[in-house]
Image: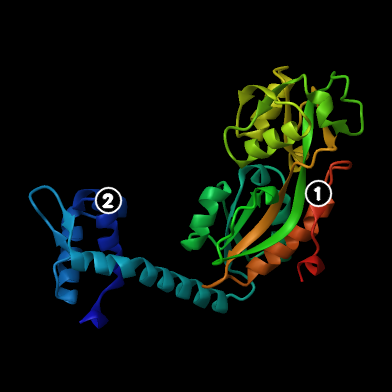
Amino acid sequence: MFASVDTTRLAVFRQVVTCGSFTAAAAALGISQPAVSQHIARLEQEVGMQLLDRAGRGMRITYPGKVLLHHTEGLLSHLREATRELTALAHPDGGEVRMVTFPSAAATIVPPVVGTFRRALPKAKVLLSEADPAVALPRLLMGDADLALVYDYPAAGEPRDPRLRWEVVADDRMAVVLPAGHPLAATAEVPLAALAGEQWIAPNPCPCLDAFVGACRGARFDPDIVSMSNDYAAMIGLVSAGIGVAVVPRIMARAPLPATVAVRPLRDARISRSIAAVTRTTGYQPPATDRLVATLREELARLAVPGLQLDVRTAAELR
């Protein structure tokens, strides 16, 4: 009986369960409510079981419905991957890569990398979206992205999901942003301990904040945090406004910086995060994905601001 199940009806069924009602599912799918009801009725005929219990105005998924739902996402995902793989075979010099990247990379290093990639493969597409690793990695596992550009802090020792392949492309040591008139703004490198008496703009609670506070305590002081933001551009703006000083990744030196601030390397303080290209170990991967990762590694050294270079990992170091 399952051989005749229509995949469109499976997609409608999943949407009804997700939305919680036929009316909401119809709005999400852009079809009429009677059409949704008809799809569900036909699906129940095809499987020979009741999938949804329509009690009054409410709706409850039955046990057979839960069983079918458990397999539906996998079935639809496999079909999407098959369609994309067949499309890539028909257009070997094109295709698309769905890339999710963390915001500070999206604002600095990703645009020139994608530009170089597109000049080499003009028929290929890179579909970009932004998310921090906590959101990006689950999206990658769900098949909503082909490649995730993420950061992590090696010192934190967080375990990595074995279903994901990590390829560290660079280490981004932190730098300090100072007002241009600050006495230490003219120095080549700034000791973190020399900033013990400053007021600080810091990230909101997250691994970035943990790494920053840990480094300050290693330099024998607790930072006086007067403002918090997870937007590095906003942090730089607050430094420019005279609110305090801030620690930011070196890639932010590529962002447009006001003349009222100076970005300097930190000395004797190893606050560093890794930048990694992450893919799934199973499932379809567009052929252009490897080319995009290779372009990223090649471009990172060229994109670095003098004095604020990234520690770029070569392909040989990964073997």
Tell me where residue 301 appears, x and y as whole percent.
83, 53
Circle 1 sits on which residue? Answer: 310
Give the residue drawn at x 69%, y 51%. Answer: 154
Residue 215: mark in rendering: none
Res. 246 image quadrant: top right
Query: In this orientation, does residue 214 appear?
Result: yes
- SS label for mark 2: helix
Is 37 displayed left or right of 232 in the figure? left
The quadrant the N terminus occupies is bottom left
Query: Is residue 264 depicted above or below 168 in this figure?
Result: above
Residue density around tag 1, few if under 14, some if 14–19, many if 20 or more, within 10 Å: many
Query: Is residue 313 depicted above or below 270 in this figure?
Result: below
Tell me where residue 144 appears, x and y as whole percent.
48, 59
Tell me where residue 170 appears, x and y as whole percent.
76, 54
Give the residue drawn at x 43%, y 69%. Answer: 80
Give the residue drawn at x 21%, y 54%. Answer: 32
Pointer 2 or 1: first along the chain: 2
Circle 2 sits on which residue? Answer: 19
Considering depth in this image, is 96 or 73 the residue closer to the camera?
73
Q: Amino acid at mark 2?
A: Cys
Considering depth in this image, is 176 or 96 the residue closer to the camera?
176
